[in-house]
Image (tube, rainbow, N blue to C red):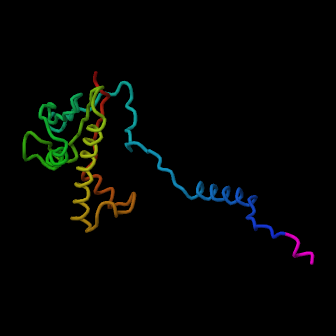
Amino acid sequence: MFGRDREREDPEVGGAGMADIAFLLLIFFLLVTTIDVDTGIGLQLPPAPEEEQEPPPIKKRNMMKILVNEQGQVLMGTEETEPTPVTQVKQKLKDFVTNRGQDPSLSDSPDKAIVSIKTQRATPYNVYINMLDEVMGAYAELRNQASQSNYGVPYKRLDEGSEKQKKIQDMYPKKISIAEPNQ
């Protein structure tokens, strides 16, 4: 009798719990999501020289000079005179480092080879980064080849700081000088 007279109420979903669920989802995504952090270019700087210390003498043939000018041209050589496409920087650098005294215009040995990189203030950033990638890639390939021939494994698979890794680094030491840009 009482139930027939009353109208049936529509069922409702409780809205109070929705805010809690949304808050929990927000916390979950904040904890789980990784944010890419731009780490920049990883270079290890040498120790600062003493003020009265004379720079060591360097034979001209052991120095590969690379200039990236403001037009985006890459000039390589002992006098920064040869315009070189960025795609050929790696091979030219590998030839320079692995010369072992055969060509008198290239380095005496990988241990004596030095790469000097210079830019100008208006150098296009992307050309500079691409050229730097080619230089680092040349050393990575040389070290990888040495590791494959000596130990049968890629250089990256050698244990960090191991004797084998140090031996490969001594075979092809990275001697890269990055000068401040000119005008």
Task: Name the residue at 29% across, 53% down.
Answer: 169
**Which quadrant holds the C terminus?**
top left
Image position, residue 119 (x, y; %):
27, 30
Among all residues in the image, which is located at the extreme bottom? 1
Q: Using the rendered view, name the quadrant where residue 122 is placed.
A: top left
Q: Using the rendered view, name the quadrant where residue 177 is placed.
A: top left
Q: Nearer the viewer, residue 127 or 40?
A: 127
Task: Name the residue at 28% across, 52% down.
Answer: 170
Among all residues in the image, which is located at the extreme top? 183
Image position, residue 118 (x, y; %):
26, 31
The magenta stretch spans which residues?
1-6
Image position, residue 60 (x, y; %):
15, 33
Instruction: Please name the predominant secondary structure of the magenta segment in the image.
Output: helix
Q: Using the rendered view, name the quadrant where residue 114 is placed.
A: top left
Residue 61 lies within the magenta run: no
Tag count = 0
Q: Nearer the viewer, residue 92 or 174?
A: 92
Above/below status of 182 relative to 162: above
**Which quadrant holds the N terminus?**
bottom right
Q: Is residue 36 left or right of residue 68?
A: right
